Image (cartoon, helix red, strand yellow):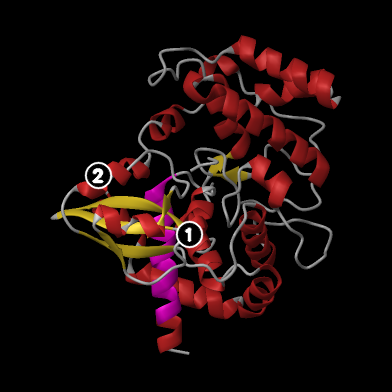
Amino acid sequence: MNTNQTKGAKLKAQTYPQALRLSPFALCLLLTACTGNLKDTDLENAFIDKMVSTHHFDAAKLHELFQSVEIKDDILKRISSPAEGLPWYKYRKIFMTDARIDGGVKFWRENEAALTAVEKQTGVPAQIIVAIIGVETFYGQKTGNYRVIDALSTLAFAYPPRSQFFSGELENYLLLCRDEQLNPLAATGSYAGAMGIPQFMPGSFRSYAVDFDNDGHRDIWHNPADAIASVANYFVKHQWQTGQAVAIPVTVTGDRYKSALSSGLKPDLRVDGLESLNLKIARSLPLNTKVKLLAIEQPQGDEFWAGLDNFYVITRYNHSPLYAMAVYQLSQSILNKKGAFP
């Protein structure tokens, strides 16, 4: 997921560590290639002070905890070159594969009861939930092998461009570990600190994770039903419109459309204004519906789509139109494949 934007060890019934192995931080201070800076110990100390004053953590335990944290140079390299920087026709090939489509059908069949119940309760289509999980972790098979605390600390204390955001996620991570009685050194995830089957950032976990089976744990690491319900809840809280389309192809004539291309992802163009721009949408919509004109790069030129409110909601999971388009197209392929082979 959502680095907001824009992945596990068994976590239940673990407690905050009383004794931690020391790992000399001097070994980590050499990892400076991407930022040119050493780990900012002033930032770390300020962070600990905040956790103590605001959330009543024990200062000595936090200092001991962070002695076991490692700053990872490869995380700094990866955060600087995300896949969303690729053109669409290359990005699409990562996710639109037979293996991922077939895996989606298999995941759907194995979790049909939960998906059916969640779709009925929330209005979020099963195929969208399955596709999110497919894009994020290949249906729980690739959840990431970085310790979450290492990932978040690296980006909070050694990556100035996003230090504020990741400091907030590190704060949320320690709070969720305390609330859920988890060992903060145990959880693994993506290089950006996203966790579990749906790749929730810690802040998203605290806000949107759901205990679907009412066992007292919001287990997005090992419980597909909790993960499924959590993804749906995320979309509901971001105003998913039940029954609305996600994206519709658009035919372009001439170049008047260029005035409608703009930054941002929120729908900003009324359907009744498309004709004056020589744009023709592939299916009828109410004239007052707002869409976002999207131009996605193909080898022979741009391909055009109208993104609706639900397309925008998918971008709240990962702030990239390429991500949202991959989720949408994968969802349709999974739905078609499952329907063809019930």
- What type is the residue that disc 2 sits on? Lys
The residue indicated by pointer 1 is 288
Horizontal arrangement in the rendering, residue 298 relative to residue 338 (left or right): left
Task: Choose mark 2 or mark 1, whichever is in front.
Answer: 1
The residue indicated by pointer 2 is 258
- What type is the residue that disc 1 sits on? Asn
Residue 102 seen in the current view = no
Which residues are the magenta region?
320-336
- In the displayed structure, 340 sits above or below 11; it is below
Residue in view at x 29 percent, y 62 percent: 250
Residue in view at x 52 percent, y 66 percent: 128
Where is residue 6 drawn, in percent x and y?
48, 43
Where is residue 113 drawn, in percent x and y?
66, 79
Residue 200 among those drawn in magenta? no
Horizontal arrangement in the rendering, residue 165 relative to residue 95 (left or right): right
Residue in view at x 42 percent, y 45 percent: 320
Give the main secondary structure, helix, strand or loop, of the magenta stretch: helix
Residue 333 among those drawn in magenta? yes
Density class for disc 2 (Cα within 10 Å; few <14, some 14-19, many ≥20) is: few
Where is residue 235 drawn, in percent x and y?
61, 57
